[in-house]
Image (cartoon, rainbow, N blue to C red):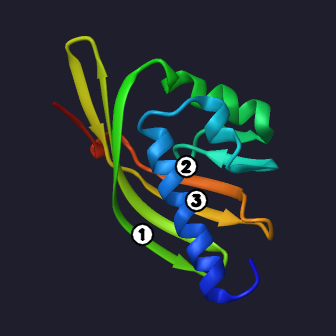
């Protein structure tokens, strides 16, 4: 990622891949988007997960669930992205929709170096 347009395009592609994988991919595929020493804080104020093993454990919690996701809004500036998306999870007869705003920082290789998800109970709708 050398030029600003190339960097913005690479970040946009990674965010879109992230949304796709959160909506139906496995934990290992999500981990591949992250740098080896990346941090993940989801939600902000919760535990900070550091490194591939911790991040894999975090995403493993949703891997077996029926889920879908859609990107609502994306902004890319410099080496960072902020975006809102919706994640719908179905577990038996229970369905819920979570609408977080995530902020990601990318390293020089285009990997996610840090991710923070901003959401709380007010951003969850029971369907």
| Residue 100 image position (x, y, % from top left) | 39, 51
Residue extending furthest toward the right? 37
Compute the Cα span from label 2 to label 3. Answer: 21 Å
Per the image, label 1 sits on a secondary structure element best described as: strand
Q: Is residue 88 left or right of residue 127?
A: right
| Residue 16 image position (x, y, % from top left) | 48, 57
Residue that badge 1 annotates: 74
Residue at 72%, 65% in the rendered image = 110
Residue extending furthest toward the top? 92
Kindly check if marks 1 and 3 are in contact, taking CB atoms under 8 A apart as contact: no
Q: Is residue 28 left or right of residue 118?
A: right
Checking the image for residue 54, the label placed there is: none
Placement of 88 over or under 3, stated as above or below: above
Residue that badge 3 annotates: 14
Q: Earlier in the sequence, mark 1 or mark 2?
A: 2
Per the image, label 2 sits on a secondary structure element best described as: loop
Residue that badge 2 annotates: 44
Residue at 20%, 13% in the rendered image = 93
Residue at 69%, 40% in the rendered image = 31
Q: Is residue 41 left or right of residue 39?
A: left
Foreground pick, 9 / 116: 9
Compute the Cα span from label 1 to label 2. Answer: 19 Å
Which quadrant does the C terminus fall into?
top left
């Amino acid at each position: 990622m050398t030029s600003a347009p190339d960097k913005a395009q690479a970040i946009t592609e990674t965010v879109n891949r992230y949304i796709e994988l959160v909506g139906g991919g496995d934990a290992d595929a999500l981990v591949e988007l992250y740098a080896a020493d990346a941090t993940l804080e989801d939600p902000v104020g919760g535990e900070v997960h550091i490194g591939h093993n911790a991040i894999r454990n975090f995403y493993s919690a949703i891997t077996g669930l029926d889920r879908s996701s859609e990107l609502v809004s994306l902004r890319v500036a410099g080496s960072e992205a902020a975006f809102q998306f919706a994640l719908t999870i179905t577990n038996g007869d229970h369905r819920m929709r979570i609408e977080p705003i995530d902020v990601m920082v990318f390293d020089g290789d285009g990997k996610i170096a840090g991710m923070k998800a901003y959401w709380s109970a007010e951003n969850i709708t029971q369907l």
